[in-house]
Amino acid sequence: MSDSNNSELMDLTFKSIIDALPCYIMIQDQDYKILFANQKLKSDFGDDIISLSCYSVLKGSHHQCNVCPVRKTFKDKKVHIIEETIHLSDGTVIEMIAYSAPLFDAVGNVRACIKLLVNVGTIKDTHRELVTLGQSIALLSHDIKNILEGLQGGAYVVEEGIKDADTELSGRGWDIVKKNITEITGITQNILYSAKERKPKMKIISPVEVARQTGQLFAEKASSMGIQLLLQLNPKVPRVSLDPTGISRMLGNLLWNSLQACHTNTEKSKHIVYVRVDYYDYNHFMYEVEDNAYGMDTQIRKNLFKEFFSSKGDSGTGLGLMVVERIIRNHQGKIEVLTKPGKGSLFRIIFRLDNKKLDLN
């Protein structure tokens, strides 16, 4: 075989290896234009990315990144490694480790940079899930112990009522059991949602009906706490594709937070919690949960959706709103929080409508 054929074979071999690698590889010039891209990069971002800027392809931006390993490599001729996020065409955000290394010309000047990006999102997600699960169990062990003791106490009262043929006593014991079953169910579901990313099981359902059923679950509890629970549901909001279990959990967590906030707010003689479903605009509908409790200050509002943050001291775990944020994110929705100290809080969750032909009259 001739030297020419050997060279062509080597070029094909190296190209096949580069295209087979499960990572993004590109070569960029000093203007951050892409001179070469491997097949993995072209498959995810298109075959027409050559000559486009790196930041426009990977970030959908018209501006250079604030932190750029390629810029550093051109400046000091060294290898640089950073963490960065990229945006796929479908809106998915991926966490990456980015490596940049110089490509020198014959006299030692950096003529181009090779940049390699490796997806570490899955590894980091798994690590976060394990940490969250461990923290959840540690934080909730005391609550779970109390609930189990409550179940045992309720079961004892039921047994005593049965033994004495006292239906009233058995009924009181069964109320205790039901209350603690509800508590342990809520805690367990929050642990499951917070400890592991779960793909929503989408169904075509009525947003109004989910809100109605969730509100009914809390009606008796609200009444026993002396709080008025009002459902304001627009029946014209159409059926859409949602995960009914996730949406019910989201509303339940927000509703329970509002009820607790009202219950602990002794400065007001009358408390009301609203649950609403209505149109937001021509393309979206919204859920709202509003209370007239004490509201939130700037610091609490800022940290509201951080993992394990709670404004309730020892009585809160911080799981509820973390789960709410995750469910909304999984539905590609948006949450707005309006609050004022001394006045109350409103949580508004906005989702896209499947059918944009709306009747707003």
Image (tube, rainbow, N blue to C red):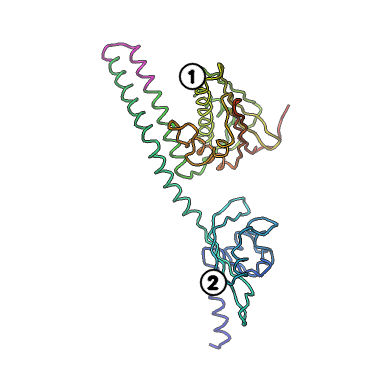
Tag 1 secondary structure: loop
Q: Residue 155 appears at what percent x and percent y?
A: 31, 22
Residue at x-position 59% and y-position 36%: 298
Judging depth in this view, the residue of 51 and 227 nearest the camera is: 227
What amino acid is found at the position of numbered circle 1 in the picture?
Met
Contact flag, marks 1 and 2 (Cβ < 8 Å)? no
Tag 2 secondary structure: helix
Q: Residue 314 appears at what percent x and percent y?
A: 43, 32
**Can residue 169 be found in the magenta stretch?**
yes
Can you say whether 331 is above or below 53 in the image? above
Among the two numbered marks 1 and 2 on one chain, the one whose residue lies closer to the N terminus? 2
Which region is colored magenta?
A: 162-176
Q: Residue 339 appears at what percent x and percent y?
A: 61, 31
Specify few, some or many for label 1: CA neighbours under 10 Å numbering under 14, 14-19, or 20 or more.
few
Q: Is residue 316 left or right of residue 251?
A: left
Can you say whether 342 is above or below 128 in the image? above
Q: CA distance from mark 1 to mark 2?
A: 68 Å
In the picture, the disc for residue 56 is none
Q: Is residue 90 left or right of residue 260?
A: right
- Quadrant housing the C terminus: top right
Q: Is residue 74 left or right of residue 135?
A: right
Judging depth in this view, the residue of 342 and 355 nearest the camera is: 342
Query: Between tags 1 and 2, which lies in front?
Result: 1
Residue at x-position 28% and y-position 16%: 160
What amino acid is found at the position of numbered circle 2 in the picture?
Ser
Residue at x-position 34% and y-position 18%: 173
Query: Disc 1 designates what residue?
Result: 225
Can you say whether 37 is above or below 321 in the image? below
Query: Disc 2 designates what residue?
Result: 16
Residue at x-position 53% and y-position 76%: 13
